[in-house]
């Protein structure tokens, strides 16, 4: 009989090697047990790919930036102004249905501009008032409630 070390691979090893919750579990254990040094493989991975999840709070930041763009344009925007912040279908440039989530989230309504005949989107709650950027701050506060957000526009 052979009693030496054995090495085998299983198709289920992919669940062990590619763990989508690695960073969350590591942060939880570090907070619970105190920070520890990384082992060699974690240090190499961290050096090559970087630390943390780069998409953390992506949705909250995206909505905050879309709200800021709407407020800076006086509460009336065209679809092309919101395209950088929303998921637009690149295969159909004439389709403006990607604006619907912003209309629902910020209580907007589509209107036809009389002078140019183009569709514009009016967000009455985001129009310039003496209150400043209250709606964007509300979005940022909502994002903080569900895990925090830090944005370059002073979101904390």
Image: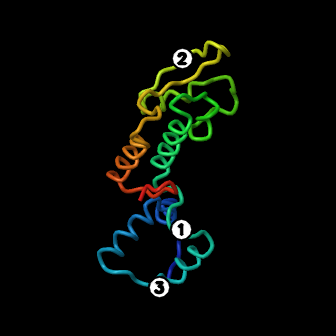
User: Where is residue 61 shown, x and y percent of the image?
Assistant: 49, 49
**Which residue is labeled 1 in the image?**
9
Q: Are marks 1 and 3 in contact (CB under 8 Å)?
A: no
Disc 3: CA contacts within 10 A as few (<14), some (14-19) or many (>=20): few
Of badges 2 and 3, the one in the foreground is 2
Describe residue 96's horizontal placement relative to residue 30 as left or right. Answer: right
User: Does 145 sit above or below residue 76?
Assistant: below
**Which residue is labeled 3 in the image?**
1
Query: Who's the residue at 63% across and 73% down the image?
Result: 48
Q: Earlier in the sequence, mark 1 or mark 2?
A: 1
Query: Who's the residue at 53% across and 33% down the image?
Result: 74
Q: Quadrant of residue 112?
A: top right
Q: Are marks 2 and 3 in contact (CB under 8 Å)?
A: no
Query: Who's the residue at 47% across and 59% down the image?
Result: 20
**Which residue is labeled 2 in the image?**
111
User: Does 119 sit above or below residue 3?
Assistant: above
Relative to the observer, which residue lies in front, 17 or 43? 43
Disc 1: CA contacts within 10 A as few (<14), some (14-19) or many (>=20): few
| Quadrant placement of the C terminus | bottom left
Q: Earlier in the sequence, mark 2 or mark 3?
A: 3
Describe residue 97's horizontal placement relative to residue 23 as left or right. Answer: right
- Number of callouts: 3
């Amino acid at each position: 009989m052979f009693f030496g070390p054995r090495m085998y691979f299983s198709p289920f090893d992919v669940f062990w090697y590619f763990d989508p919750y690695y960073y969350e579990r590591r942060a939880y254990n570090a907070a619970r047990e105190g920070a520890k040094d990384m082992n060699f493989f974690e240090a190499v991975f961290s050096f090559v790919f970087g630390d943390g999840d780069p998409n953390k709070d992506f949705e909250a930041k995206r909505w905050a930036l879309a709200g800021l763009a709407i407020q800076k344009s006086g509460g009336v925007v065209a679809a092309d102004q919101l395209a950088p912040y929303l998921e637009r279908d690149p295969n159909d440039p004439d389709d403006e249905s990607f604006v619907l989530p912003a209309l629902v989230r910020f209580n907007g309504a589509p209107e036809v501009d009389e002078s140019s005949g183009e569709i514009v989107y009016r967000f009455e709650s985001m129009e310039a008032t003496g209150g400043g950027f209250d709606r964007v701050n509300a979005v940022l506060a909502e994002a903080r409630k569900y895990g925090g957000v830090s944005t370059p526009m002073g979101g904390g």
